[in-house]
Structures are given as C-alpha cells and as structure tokens.
Amino acid sequence: MLFVISFIFGAIVGSFLNVCIFRIPAGKSIAFPPSHCPKCQAPIMWYDNIPIISYLVLIGKCRKCREPISARYPMVEFITALLSLAAFIKLGPSLSYFIYFAFIASLIVITFIDLDHQIIPDIISLPGIPIGFIASFALPDITYKESLIGILAGGGILFLVAAGYEFLAKKEGMGGGDIKLLAMVGAFLGWKGALFTIFSGSLIGTVIGVALMAAQGKDSKYAIPFGPFLSMGALLYLFLGEPIIFWYLGML
C-alpha cells in the first residue's frame, strides 16, 4: 500500500511539475491562475485534472474545445511517479525520501525546460545549492563536508571546462546554468556524486548527441542542451552509483 501511495504522490507532484515546466520560462506565476487549457483557456475541472487517468479518459483532448493536449503532460506525471516509487523502495518512509524526491523533482523540471528552451532557470538551481547543503545535516549517507566539497568541485570543474573551451574556441560552449546545476548536484550528492555525474552525464550526452547528429545530418557544431544529461547522471548515481563504482573499480 505504501508503494502505491508513493506512486500516486509522485504522479500528483508530476502534475504540478508540468505547471512549473510551462510557466517558469514564461515568467508566469506557478500558483495563479488555476490550471486551464492552453488552447481555449477554459478552466480545467478537478475531475479532468487527475494525473495520467484524466488524459486517458479524455483521449488526450480538452473537454471543451477538443483540441489535442500534449502527451508530455502524462509522460512527466508517469516519470515522476516511477521515480517517486523508486526512491521510496530505496529509502523507505524517511526524511531522506522526501529530501531526495524534492531533488529529483527539481531535476525533472530542469530537464524539460532545458530541452525546450536551452536554459536552466536560476530560480531552481541557485536555491538548490544552499538547500542541498542544509539537507546534508539531516541525510545519513552524506556529511556537510562532502556536500561543501561537492559544491566547490562540481561547480568549479565545469567552470574550468567552460572557461577553457571559451578561451580556446573563442566562443561560449557551456552556459552558466550547467555550472550552477552541477553545484546543486554536488550539494545533494557530495563530491563523489558530482564527479560521477560529470563523467556519466558526458558519456550519455556523447552517445545520444552523436546519434542525434547522425540521424538529423548535423555537424559537431549542433547545439545540444547538457542539463538533461547531467540530470540523468545524477539520477544514475542516486540509484545505482555505488554498484557501478564498485564494478568499475573491479575492472581496473
């Protein structure tokens, strides 16, 4: 029953994350006005706003204007629900679950905003840095020293990489948003998590980036947002980091 509750809780939070993904880049309030159809502006009633289920019942269309609703809405809700369940299975009914689920939720919002607009909003990453550091005092698997080093190492390494690329190529290759994001990751996951996120995010980004460039006929100058790959790396460390590290060390 608790597993089911964690899944439902995640889906409900995912519905709110959809609002954040749409409104934050537009500079709109995430609280007002209430949910409404983006096409006809008709208010969405509570029975049409049940995560995942309402989309299926309405066959992906607005009840009033019958215009199609993006499949991204239930997808975000489902992804958030699955990650909430995964975090609950790993951490149980604990303070750690709520802290890391808040971290996961922020990564989901950052990922989809970066995919849409190629920006990582400071309103999420910057507060996330001190919040992650404060949270380290309550988390059993990370110390405040590891969190502080994670902030400095995560943000510092990407800053050096970005500065070096800009110096050599005479153009910006990495935005400041990625640097702040990795500092936030380091705050929540410590320096080990920050380093793991850099390497795994870079590997995932390289594989997917090359595949996208090949599929779309683009060259190496094709701009691909890095935030989603850093978020994937952070999630990979959160759920499977230690087994992967032990496996890798055993290969050496």
Image (cartoon, rainbow, N blue to C red):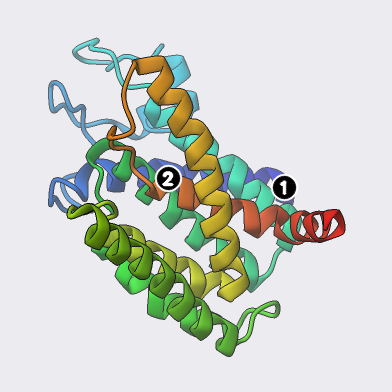
176 to the left or right of 97:
left
Q: Is mark 2 on a helix, strand or loop?
A: helix
Work out how far the residue at label 1 is from the one at label 2, CA to CA, in angstroms: 27 Å
Outermost residue on the front side: it is 168
Q: Which residue is drawn at 36% across and 27% down?
A: 48
Residue 3 image label? 1
Can the viewer see residue 98? no
Give, as a three-letter code, the residue at label 2.
Answer: Pro
* Residue in the foreground of this view, choosing between 101 and 194: 194
Q: Which residue is drawn at 49% across and 61% down?
A: 102
Label 1 crowding class (10 Å Cα cut-off): few <14, some 14-19, many 20+? some
* Residue 55 drawn at (x, y percent): 42, 21
Can the viewer see residue 185? yes
Residue 57 image label? none
* Residue 157 drawn at (x, y percent): 43, 70
* Residue 171 drawn at (x, y percent): 18, 52
Mark 1 and mark 2 lie on one chain; the one further toward the N terminus is 1
100 to the left or right of 19:
right
